[in-house]
Image (cartoon, rainbow, N blue to C red):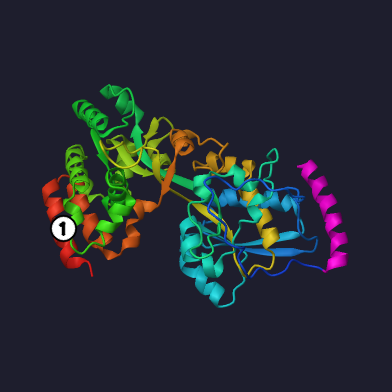
Amino acid sequence: MNTRKVITLLVTLLTLSSLVLSGCGAPAATEAPAPVEQPAEAPAAAPTEVPPTAVPTAEPVTLVYWSMWNEDEPMGQVMKQAIDAFKADHPNVTIEVTWQGRGVRKLFTAAIDSGTVIDLIDNDTGRLALSWGEKYILGLDSYLTQPAIGTDGKTVAETIYPLLLNQYKTKDSSSIASVPFNPYVNLWFYNKAHFEEAGVTQVPTTFEEWMAANEKLKAAGHSAFTYDADSYADIMAGDSAQRYVGCEAFNAAMTDKTGAAWQTPAFEQWAKDMEAFSAYAAPGTAANVYPAGQQALALGDVTMMYNGTWMPSEVAETAGADFQWGGFSWPAATGGFGTINDYDMGSQGMAITKVSQHPDVAFEFIKYVVSKEIQTAVTNVGYASSLVDVPWTGPIADAYPLMKNATTAYGWACGGWDTGDFFANDLLPTFTDLSTGKITADAFLTQMEEKAKTNIP
């Protein structure tokens, strides 16, 4: 910390000299940087003379940050730690935080439109880029080449998982709109003690291996799986379909007025396998209301549940310190789509608004949020880090190699929510019936074909 302060002092003196010649203050950011081609990997490092802890101005600056966290929740405390670390190095900068909680997504655009000045906003990276990006969010491509804090010359971009950083870009300008700092990956969480009792010695990687494991669990007296039907039927449907038909075909089926897609071999195999899988659902799964399903897992009443990497932190008190958490990817379908290294993933990201008068200072704070110190603190409270070299620990330790080996990132529920009302009103309740044993595969496919013909506008 002392070394950084010395560097900061030197840069501050240099900056004061330049201000005498060029005038004070950073210009208002009103335009996103020019579009860039989407890289297969993180953008390469670019030469820069800006040290990691440089402050663009020595004048007093106030940054207004609207946070999606509540102050007293674990991630809220981590953000406070980032603010304190930044403030220690940059005493001339004040960060005014409004702890808006999850409702910030409903307030942000109206506030900007009414003239409220907000410098920093955090939220889902997809929302920041696709919904807010062009009008409200500053493109960060030119900033990402700056050196990261606490690394040996790596740029900020080089420290972040490329799949997360490049997953969503603004629609028109193709700019990176935010820096991911709190990612998730969807996977099957399981009770390792149950696997051991049932004689399941390795996690399944194919559907056939999975069914064999489920049969062993059943023989050992364990219900294999459950989920909260009111909350997570979407990822159960979308992420299972991805393995059989891929997200593009899955979404196309929900906008096809002919209903023909539901009678194709790939969809038929998906429905058939989900019918077979349903035989191992815990009793009452279809009626589960959040958080009943995940509590059942934490209590040891069921062996597996499909969810995001935040879930263990939600049931930590119920599960206790002795719960043996494991995790594995959704197994591959025979003759299916893609590989088991394709994941439903995303992240919360930190963005700078186009109305910010201090974008350089704001990005300096973002660098602290994705510093190794703060990202390690994220893992210490049970969440995942966006930094490649910060391992995920505790209950989500098995998810870390999945993220490291991921080759494809797709959006929540395979993008089903983007297709319209058919997904929510027709697909999800029918899939829930299929995956919990209420209807057969043939009935599912017939119903979906009929619903497509009558319910798609």
Q: Is residue 252 visible?
A: yes
Please name whichever residue, 227 or 205, is drawn nearer the observer in this view of the structure.
205
- Nearer-the-camera pick, 172 or 302: 172
Asked whether residue 359 is drawn in magenta, I would say no
Q: Is residue 18 left or right of residue 233?
A: right
Q: Position of residue 81 (x, y in %)?
A: 63, 48
Residue at left offset 55%, top offset 57%: 176
> Is-magenta flag for residue 22?
yes
* Residue at 77% in and 44% down: 4
Label 1, secondary structure: give it: helix
Question: Can you say which quadrant of the picture contains the N terminus?
Answer: top right
| Rendered residue at 80%/50% (across/down) | 8
Residue 310 seen from this side: no
Q: Position of residue 135 (x, y in %)?
A: 53, 70
Tell me the quadrant of the picture where the C terminus can be found: bottom left
Image height check: is 363 above or below 318? below
Residue tagged by mark 1?
449
Q: Quadrant of residue 63?
A: bottom right
Where residue 222 sits in the image (x, y, percent)?
A: 23, 31
Q: Is residue 53 above or below residue 220?
A: below
Above or below, comparing residue 370 to residue 204 in the picture:
below
Which residues make up the magenta segment? 1-23
